[in-house]
Structures are given as structure tokens and as C-alpha cells.
Image: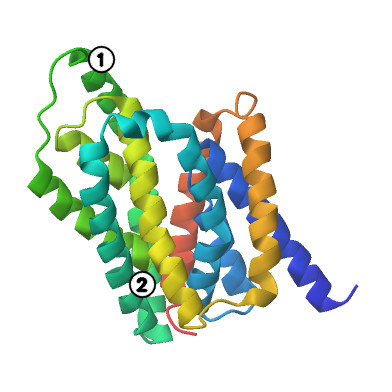
């Protein structure tokens, strides 16, 4: 078989698997980004292509949270505004980095993402326990600290983003959003908007490799649907440790290969 066909098949499979993982446990970028590097893309182009390919699956998930978003309409506009600013700043910084400078940061970014996933189980359980304990009590949301934290997190989303969902949930919980459904709804909107701005920037700066991106978007969407339909059969308690181990392994690989 021609090399280009095998490479495209490999990336399609990686995007499909990334979609499945995102729909069940998160962390699909741990699969797609190194696959694009392995296919020969430069680091910044690989990250941009990965972000664009995985974004449509994030957007479609907003519809499922529309009822919970209505309960926090007063927060939606400020957090979306901050997400747009952070996503713009992070993606702008990435696009103005050199390839080797970004590559030297990649192992640390994977370490951050992997550590976030490793902590996600205990933190998620703590958030749920706190939500139950405060059920029925009035919320007091610390808006200014929340917006500052979200600005930092969405900057990271625009720049790289692995593990950002947990960071966003933690910030919302720490600043007073109590109900888990509302935390998930706001988290989805925040990460989707930050990534949307990054997607627009990456397309405008022609950092996306469309040879691979268009079919990766399709297979990722199929993978996301497949994962959602079979989520009860695939335990995230099994999948999450695999993703964490993979993230740390990729970080080690990039530490030992620090230059192009």
C-alpha cells in the first residue's frame, strides 16, 4: 500500500480513538497530537491540526447542557468573554513561538495534563460530595477570582490544553459553583469557546494541515458518537489509568527527544 494511504489510515484511527476517549473520559489529544508528530508534522502545526480536528465534538456537547446553562446565565457572558480572551492570548503565543521552543515545552505540558488526569478521580469525587452537602443552600460565587483563574486556564487551553477540563471544573468549584451539572455545563462552554478562538487563529495563520485535518474531524466525530453510545460498556475506571500512563510515557519520550 502507498505510504500516504497508510499514514492517513493511521491518523484516521488515532482521531477515531481520540473521539472515543474524549466522550468517555477526556484526553483524546494524548492520542492525536503525538500521532501527528509521528506523521511528520512540525510541533506547532501538529497542535493546531489536533485542536481543529477535535473541536467539533466539543461543540456538539453544548446542546446537552442548555438547561443547566440557563440556571447560570449571569455567569455565561463574563466567563465566555474571559475564555475568548484567554484562548486568543494562548493561541497567539503558540503561533509566535519557534518550533523548537514549543517542542521543549511539550513534555512539561504532557506532565501537567497527565497529572491533572491522575488527580481527576479524587477531585471529581470531592466536587460531587461538596455538591451533595450544599444541596439546597444558596450559592455565593466569587466572580472576580473565578475570572482570573479562568483567564489563566483558557490561556493554557489556547496554547495546548491537555487536562484543562479538570482545571476548569476545579476553578468553578473553588469559586462557589456547587451543582455538578452546572459545573459541567459551564466547563463545556468555557473550553469550547477558548478552543473555538484558537481554531479561528490557527486557520487564519494557516497553521492547520488540511491534508489530514478534514478526515480526522470526521473520524473523531464518529468516535465521539461511538464512545457516547457505548459509554456504559467501557469503564472510565479502566480507560483513565491507561490514558494517564500513556500521557506520562509520551512526556518521557519528548524529554528524551528534545529537538526536531
Q: Residues within 10 Å of mark 1 (few under 14, many from 20)?
A: few
The answer to which image quadrant residue 60 occupies is top right
* Secondary element type, mark 2: helix
Up-down relation of residue 62 to residue 81 (above or below): above
Residue 169 x %, y %: 29, 39
Q: Residues within 10 Å of mark 2 (few under 14, many from 20)?
A: many
Label 1 belongs to which residue? 132
Front residue (pair 70, 258): 70
Residue at 62% of width from left, 43% of height from top?
224
Q: Position of residue 233 (x, y in %)?
A: 65, 25
For the question of whether residue 163 can be seen, the reply is no
Q: Residue at x 58, y 62 (%)?
A: 53
Q: Where in the figure is residue 213, as x and y percent of width and height? A: 63, 68
Using the image, determine if residue 207 lies above or below residue 223. Answer: below
Residue 112 in view: yes
* Residue tagged 2: 91
Q: Are marks 2 and 1 in contact (CB under 8 Å)?
A: no
Amino acid at each position: 500500500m502507498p505510504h500516504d494511504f497508510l499514514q492517513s489510515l493511521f491518523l484516521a484511527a488515532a482521531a477515531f480513538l481520540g473521539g472515543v476517549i474524549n466522550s468517555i473520559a477526556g484526553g483524546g489529544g494524548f492520542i492525536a497530537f503525538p500521532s501527528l508528530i509521528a506523521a511528520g508534522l512540525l510541533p506547532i502545526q501538529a497542535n493546531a491540526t489536533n485542536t481543529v480536528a477535535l473541536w467539533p465534538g466539543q461543540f456538539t456537547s453544548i446542546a446537552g447542557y442548555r438547561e443547566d446553562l440557563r440556571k447560570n446565565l449571569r455567569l455565561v457572558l463574563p466567563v465566555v468573554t474571559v475564555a475568548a480572551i484567554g484562548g486568543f492570548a494562548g493561541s497567539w503565543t503558540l503561533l509566535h513561538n519557534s518550533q523548537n521552543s514549543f517542542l521543549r515545552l511539550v513534555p512539561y505540558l504532557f506532565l501537567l495534563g497527565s497529572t491533572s488526569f491522575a488527580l481527576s478521580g479524587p477531585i471529581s469525587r470531592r466536587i460531587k460530595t461538596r455538591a451533595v452537602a450544599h444541596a439546597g443552600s444558596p450559592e455565593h460565587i466569587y466572580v472576580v477570582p473565578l475570572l482570573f483563574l479562568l483567564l489563566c486556564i483558557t490561556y493554557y487551553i489556547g496554547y495546548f490544553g491537555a487536562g484543562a477540563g479538570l482545571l476548569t471544573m476545579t476553578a468553578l468549584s473553588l469559586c462557589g459553583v456547587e451543582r455538578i451539572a452546572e459545573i459541567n455545563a459551564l466547563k463545556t462552554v468555557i473550553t469550547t469557546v477558548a478552543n473555538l478562538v484558537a481554531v479561528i487563529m490557527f486557520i487564519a495563520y494557516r497553521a492547520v494541515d488540511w491534508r489530514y485535518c478534514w478526515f480526522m474531524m470526521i473520524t473523531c466525530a464518529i468516535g465521539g458518537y461511538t464512545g457516547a453510545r457505548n459509554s456504559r460498556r467501557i469503564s472510565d475506571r479502566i480507560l483513565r489509568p491507561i490514558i494517564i500512563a500513556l500521557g506520562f510515557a509520551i512526556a518521557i519520550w519528548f524529554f528524551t527527544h528534545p529537538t526536531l
